[in-house]
Amino acid sequence: MNIIAKKNLWFAISITLILISVAAFLFNSLTKGKIMNFGIDFTGGTLLTVRFDKEVATHEIRDTLAKYGLTQSVIQKTGKDDFSIRTDPLETDVRQKIMNDLREKFGQVELLEADVIGPVIGKELRTQALWALLVASVLITIYVSFRFEFKYAVAALIALYHDAFITAGIIALLWRTVDAPFVAAILTIMGYSINDTIVIFDRIRENIKKPGAVKKHFATIVNESINQTMARSINTVLTTLVMVTALLLFGGATIKDFALVLFVGFLAGAYSSIFVASPLLVLWHRGKNR
């Protein structure tokens, strides 16, 4: 398969997805006042710690909160019968009504702690997320430049941001909650994508060193390298997606958004490693030759 010869098609697909992402951000900003559905981790809210006198399922608590429009609340089991509930900001009377509903439904329910999560914490989280992305980018650039060449690092980094941006755009389009696990998922996607890209780059380097390689065009060597690693890339992403799909279908409400981000990101990462990073490398090489 001559992938490099069709690089304009692959770039057109990527540009289309990027434009869809930009359109999603603009639409959300104009109609909903923010580009993405930032969760409590970013916007602040109320943190409740409650204790039940019997075993209670997470979805049962969520059903009670849904009556107050708190469908995006984060509910985590912290002990045998203890739960941590993070919701949008609650007035004291609303909080009391929720506790009364829980007691009416489950019997004895004790409110252990009620805290307010301020927007300052959300601002700090946004700052830390940006620093995490920046540090990861710098380290990846240093590592790839040291192992290969600087042009390989640039191509890999463009592919990584391609994956992160498109993933964020799809999540914005679907208006899914963006919280701390979203940041973790994006960093996981970058790790997966750079690993897949380096496998192809490593094969390119090996093929360049083979006898007779000097008689071939660089684009031909890159195309051969992609085809030689294609089966490995497809098998890897399919195996990974099987596990992520299982999380998406059976992982529960608290992990579904995280699994969805991984699903979209792994698809984007598999695509960019083959159809974005390597063709970019060929374009850079041609420019250098000229």
Image (cartoon, rainbow, N blue to C red):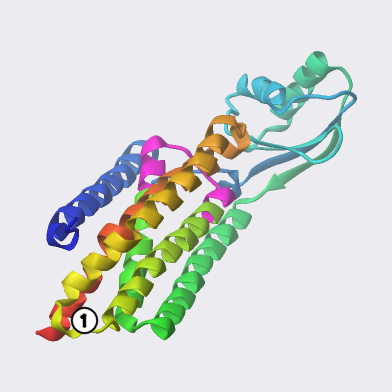
- Locate residue 125, reporting x and y percent: 58, 58
Q: Quadrant of residue 175?
A: top left
**Quadrant into which the N terminus falls:** bottom left
For label 1, the residue is 213
The residue nearer to you, when weighing 245 against 204, is 204
- Name the outermost residue toward the left: 290
Q: Main secondary structure of the magenta part?
A: helix
Q: Is residue 36 left or right of residue 286?
A: right
- Residue at x 12%, y 61% (from the top left corner): 5
Q: Is residue 165 visible?
A: no
Residue for point 36% across, 39% down: 173
Position in image of residue 252 (x %, y %): 62, 32
Q: Amino acid at mark 1?
A: Ala
In this view, the residue in front, 184 or 283, is 283
Question: Is 10 contained in the magenta span?
Answer: no
Residue at (54, 42) in percent of width and height: 243
Q: Residue at x 26, y 58 (%)?
A: 275
Q: Is residue 169 magenta?
A: yes
Toward the viewer: 57 or 247? Answer: 247
x and y percentages locating residue 209 in the rendered image: 30, 84
| Range of residues picked out in magenta | 168-183
Residue 104 higher or lower than 129, as above or below? above
Q: Is residue 31 visible?
A: yes
